Image (spheres, rainbow, N blue to C red):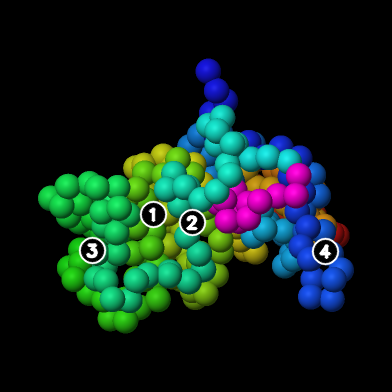
């Protein structure tokens, strides 16, 4: 039986600059994520977090090493790996429902089932009544909820999230984190989440992976020891604060 989950083995990445020099972005990255696990990548700008995400998504190829999902080597993009970016990237000419059904249509899911599944997902993200609204008629937070619904409705084996809530204010970011956990509890997706926010990483993750400055290397992996269903209540408790301070020390001394 093939190994399940995500496996990143000795991945290195280098980029060619305009002046002909090369920048080493990733150095010997090894990482595993079990099915149904949420793992956050933390680190300073330029530490290679998004570069790794692009390799896992299949957008870029590493100069060496390999990435496998459920035992299958990743060589390009796939509908089994969905990406949610900081900007919602919705189709402006499609309604919220049509954005959510877009991937289902490409998979040749029958129209009635597409409509039913899109309606369920939009209800789950709190957008019932906005099914026929266009992106320009929705707030930034509502657009990001449509983007989440569009990703989750496809039941991807891996969901990749690149600072999806970074542009939102603190209150809305907290609500979106709660929504993500709600969707995860219902669907059980495997999620790799890139963020600069330490509290966000602790709140939504089973594990936090801390990256060093370029060339990006993994400095530390920490398990978050709190039950998912109580993360919101634990924000002010000593154990939560101690973990936050530990992570901040690791990041501050990079």
Determine which residue is flagged by label 4.
23
Residues under numbered marks 2 and 3 in contact, where contact means CB atoms less than 8 Å apart: no
Question: Are there few (<14), some (14-19), or many (20+) residues within 10 Å of tag 3?
Answer: many
- N-terminal of the pair, mark 1 or mark 3, is 3
Q: Alpha-carbon distance for marks 4 and 1?
A: 32 Å
Disc ID at residue 83: 2
Give me the C-alpha separation between circle 2 and circle 3.
Answer: 19 Å
Q: Is residue 57 magenta?
A: yes
Q: Which residues are magenta?
A: 53-64
Q: Is residue 21 above or below residue 57?
A: below
Whole-angstrom CA distance, mark 2 to mark 1, is 7 Å
Res. 144 visible in picture: yes
Question: Given the current orientation, which residue lies at the most extreme front position?
Answer: 20
SS type, badge 3: helix
Which badge, 2 or 1, is on the more N-terminal residue? 2
Please report whichever mark, 4 or 1, sits nearer to the chain's N-terminal start: 4
User: Which of the two discs, 4 and 3, labels the residue nearer the N terminus?
Assistant: 4
Q: 54 and 134: which one is in front?
A: 54
Left or right: 133 in relation to 5: left
Labels 2 & 1 near each other (Cβ < 8 A): yes
The local secondary structure at tag 1 comes to helix
């Amino acid at each position: 039986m093939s190994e399940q989950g995500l496996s990143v083995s000795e991945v290195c990445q280098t980029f060619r600059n305009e002046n002909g020099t090369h920048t080493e972005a990733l150095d010997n990255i090894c990482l595993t994520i079990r099915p149904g696990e949420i793992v956050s990548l933390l680190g300073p700008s330029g530490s290679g977090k998004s570069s790794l995400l692009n390799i896992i998504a299949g957008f870029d190829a590493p100069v060496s090493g390999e990435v496998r999902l459920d035992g299958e080597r990743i060589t390009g993009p796939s509908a089994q790996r969905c990406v949610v970016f900081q900007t919602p990237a919705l189709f402006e000419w499609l309604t919220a429902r049509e954005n959510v059904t877009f991937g289902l249509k490409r998979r040749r899911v029958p129209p009635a089932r597409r409509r039913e599944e899109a309606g369920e997902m939009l209800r789950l993200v709190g957008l019932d009544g906005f099914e026929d609204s266009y992106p320009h008629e929705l707030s930034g937070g509502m657009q990001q909820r449509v983007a989440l619904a569009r990703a989750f409705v496809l039941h991807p084996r891996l969901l990749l999230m690149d600072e999806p809530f970074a542009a939102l204010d603190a209150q809305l970011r907290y609500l979106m984190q709660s929504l993500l956990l709600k969707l995860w509890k219902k669907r059980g997706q495997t999620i790799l989440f890139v963020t600069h926010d330490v509290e966000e990483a602790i709140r939504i993750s089973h594990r936090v992976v801390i990256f060093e400055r370029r060339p990006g290397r993994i400095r530390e992996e920490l398990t978050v020891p709190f039950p998912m269903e109580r993360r919101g209540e634990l924000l002010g408790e000593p154990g939560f604060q101690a973990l936050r301070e530990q992570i901040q020390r690791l990041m501050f001394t990079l």
